[in-house]
Amino acid sequence: MEAPKKGYLFETDEHRALREQVRRFAAAEIAPNAHAWDEANEFPRELYPRAAKAGFLGVGYPEELGGDGGDLSHVLCASEEMVLAGKSVGTCVGLGSHGIALPPIVRFGNDDQKERFIGPTLAGEKIAALAITEPGGGSDVAAVRTKAVRDGDHYVVNGSKTFITSGCRADFITTAVRTGEEGHGGLSMLVIESDTPGFSVSNKLKKTGWWASDTAELVFEDCRVPVGNLIGQEGAGFLMIMMNFVTERLSLAGQCVAIAELAYRESVDYAKERRAFGQNLAGFQVIRHKLADMATRIAAARALTGECVTRYLDGEQTPSLAAMAKNTATDMCSSVCDQAVQIHGGYGYMREYVVERLYRDARLYPIGGGTREIMNEIIGKVEGY
């Protein structure tokens, strides 16, 4: 794979063509509305089919399933440009929530499930969400309590989920449920459609960042879900979740690189334009050194993330590397966005400025997809201490 140009994770001819395609869409459809959608706490549902037509939703999915082909590097390339050109993290993650909801169906679903759920989602006709986290569970996946009890040709589901991206308007939710004993061996994955009687969105959550992306608390009260919506076999849910985590964490690391790169670019532009004490801010050594430190940390996180993705695509098992990349990228992103606000001064604290949004958006990443502390536990186990 060719070495990327400065500022990008991957840069082959294919990646360049995809980047240009996504850039045109994001610059025209998202960037002009980024602030308004953030303030409105959602973006229009009509954006999904437009994103599908632009070739964004199907990246990384086989063409025979309605996708546009490509691998994880192309997925990261598309989301990276979506952030850089669209300047809205919340819109990017909202549009991309199928990226964690569909993989279990792609890998383990039957033909009927693939036809009903994957094609319509990649066409922008349906919205998909993934529901694992519960109010009392947090990062402890094996502690899932939502129960699915077999009753003839249905499962009766009772329980609740929280922090579910796109949960407020999802048409179906790929849901972790307990069909067996306590612990990871009793977990299964069900597709629960939002029009199922007994399903409800109990709360649209108000967050520090990602405002344009809706986040929900979900409740299941005697939901009767067809057995045909079971993904794979009973008891295989934990494996599906673990397989999902590596790509999710690498995707989050890639998003952090993009967010930090955008914060850095905004800061460079501001430092060159803003004048103080008779010169622009870039004329002060202290500002130049801040920018140099930001660029250095971004380059380091980009290199590690790119290496991890490349090794994953080469078939290497990379749970600890993915954890390292996520921790490195999230720490870097938080620091760079903080410095971006500092360079902007009082304007960096104003909501209409991009760096203010990025500063808030960055805080989720050391938590989402497994906390920083959980990542260190994974690294420690693999390293043998």
Image (cartoon, rainbow, N blue to C red):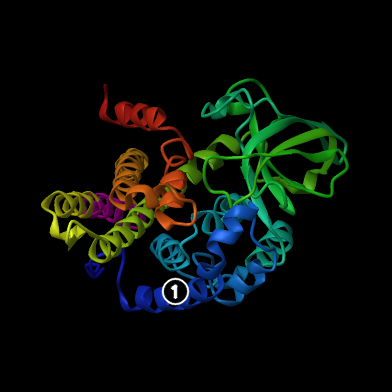
Residue 71 occupies which quadrant of the picture?
A: bottom left
Viewer can see residue 95: no
Residue 13: x %, y % from top left:
32, 79
Q: Is residue 384 left or right of residue 78?
A: left
Examine the residues drawn in magenta and state their main secondary structure: helix
133, above or below 300, in the image: above
Q: Amino acid at mark 1?
A: Arg
Q: Residue furthest left?
A: 285
Residue 298: where, in percent of width, then height? 25, 52
Secondary structure, mark 1, is: helix
- Indicate the quadrant where residue 273 lies: bottom left
User: Residue 121 at what x, y percent from top left?
Assistant: 66, 63
* Quadrant placement of the C terminus: top left
Q: Nearer the viewer, residue 246 or 344?
A: 344
Q: Residues within 10 Å of mark 1 (few under 14, many from 20)?
A: many
Q: Which residues are magenta?
A: 298-314
Disc 1: which residue: 23
- Quadrant holding the N terminus: bottom left
Q: Report the side of 159 relative to 134 (left or right).
A: right
Q: Is residue 50 left or right of residue 115?
A: left
Q: Examine the rendered structure and indicate whether residue 287 appears above or below residue 87.
A: above
